Image (tube, grey):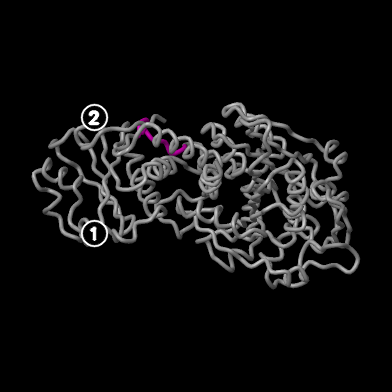
Amino acid sequence: MNAKPIPAPIFSSSAEALVYGRFQDEPLSESLTQLDAALDGAIGQMGDKELPGKKHAVTVLTPLGRISAKRIAIVGLGKQADLDPRTLTHAATVAVRELKDKGIAEVAIDLPGDPRLIVEGAYMALFEPDAYHKERKTTTISTLCFANANESEVEKGRIVGEAINFCRTLVNEPANSLTPTALADQAQQAAERSGLSLTVLDEDDMHRLGMCCLLAVGRGSEKRAKLIVMSHRPNPDQPYKLALVGKGVTFDTGGISIKPTEGMGAMKGDMAGAAATIAAMEAIGRLNLPINVLGVAPAVENMPDGAAYRPGDVIKAMNGKTVEIITTDAEGRLALADALTFAARQGAERIVDLATLTGAVGIALGPYATGAMTNNPELLELVRSAGESVGERIWELPAWDDYSQLIKSPIADLKNASANRRAGAIAGGVFLKEFVEDRPWVHLDIASTATVGEHQPGMAQGPSGVPVRALVRLAESLV
């Protein structure tokens, strides 16, 4: 897919389709006024019902030869005072999706706001989850053009947009295809594309490091666990300013504490944190950010078997703490525990973990925000601001010391789940805090935001790519 900046007015270009924005209850913008003149006043004659400007409503017009373009898509932006990064990105996405099947090769976009967000949104429109259909949906769009943008803005948006869709592609893969080894292979390809260095630790390596929590999760599976380590280190004499640690459970049955059938098929996506980590690291490498960033992804499959770990077991983590297993369906935090310790011992100055950790976060926040916990308010504010800049909402959950009572065990240092369902998302976070070795740390529970649902009309259903964009912006903010 080609992407390039073009001068306004876009209707003077060779593009076969044009995208404009319309604010609700406002006069036509300067761009639309120019287009209206070129169309002999056809747009001005349309009433609010035909061109409402309501958020994400799309009206597609045919110019009937008055200009060279074959189609014009006018997307609603809502109230002008309410325009934010989330609305702008989604507007670009829904408008381009409306044009995907119209036999059009080149689309020109003129929307108000941050050009990079518009580029990212347009690229997000290109993803489809139908990878295994006999006849896949296809698009003839080969070039996206952006007004009011320079080459650098378009290139940055393209790199991040491609990373988002790479993440979504990984999460969409079935578990019989995307095993821990296959996920490591995908990370290798991403590293080669972006100039990152990659190390993949096998189970022998993990044994030597004492990663017994991560190893326990994979004991019931024939698919061997891997620890994926990606490094972007343009300043080799300096420490890692940031480590991203993503949960990579490629399929989660719940283990011996087996899940009900309903919803288990969605557990192929329990590696969304790892996918976002790998994709964000690729984008960071391709952007050549002058900052050292480490990416760590424990890749493992949680299956029931005669060798599987059990409720009641006690396991020693890499940092020496012992963990009583209350449920084998709280496996992600075990895999992350050793990965977090590993990242801290690589000298990372800040750590952000991301995981589809708990269903409880969706009960608390629904699909509209990612839950966050921290031991460092300053780092959380950087993460939250990065998310806000791209329209990815992040909401803090408390991490008060009181909540540590939820994970106290009478026979071990910790237990991997609370005895009841109270504060389930928080219990997961305070457990992880035990393994960051006092580094500034933020935990992102993306269990309810890693998937697109009916709450996001106009988007392809399936993986969302959250929080790839926020992670990249975070890394940029630390430069």
Crowding at mark 2 (Cα within 10 Å: few <14, some 14-19, many 20+): few
**Residue receiving disc 1:** 52
Q: If the image is split into quadrants, where does the C terminus sit?
A: top right
Marks 2 and 1, how far apart at CA? 28 Å
Crowding at mark 1 (Cα within 10 Å: few <14, some 14-19, many 20+): many
> What is the x, y in percent for residue 278?
61, 39
State which region is magenta.
136-144
**Residue receiving disc 2:** 14
> What is the x, y in percent for residue 301?
74, 46
Q: Quadrant of residue 227?
A: top right
Q: Does label 2 or label 1 sit earlier along the sequence?
A: 2
Picture layout, residue 122 above or below residue 450: above
Q: What residue is shown at x 42% (from left), y 36% (from top)?
A: 138
Q: Could you tell whether 14 is left or right of 430 in the image?
A: left
Classified by dominant secondary structure, the portion drawn in magenta counts as: loop
| Element type where label 1 sits in the image | loop
| Element type where label 2 sits in the image | loop
Q: Tag 2: residue type?
A: Ser
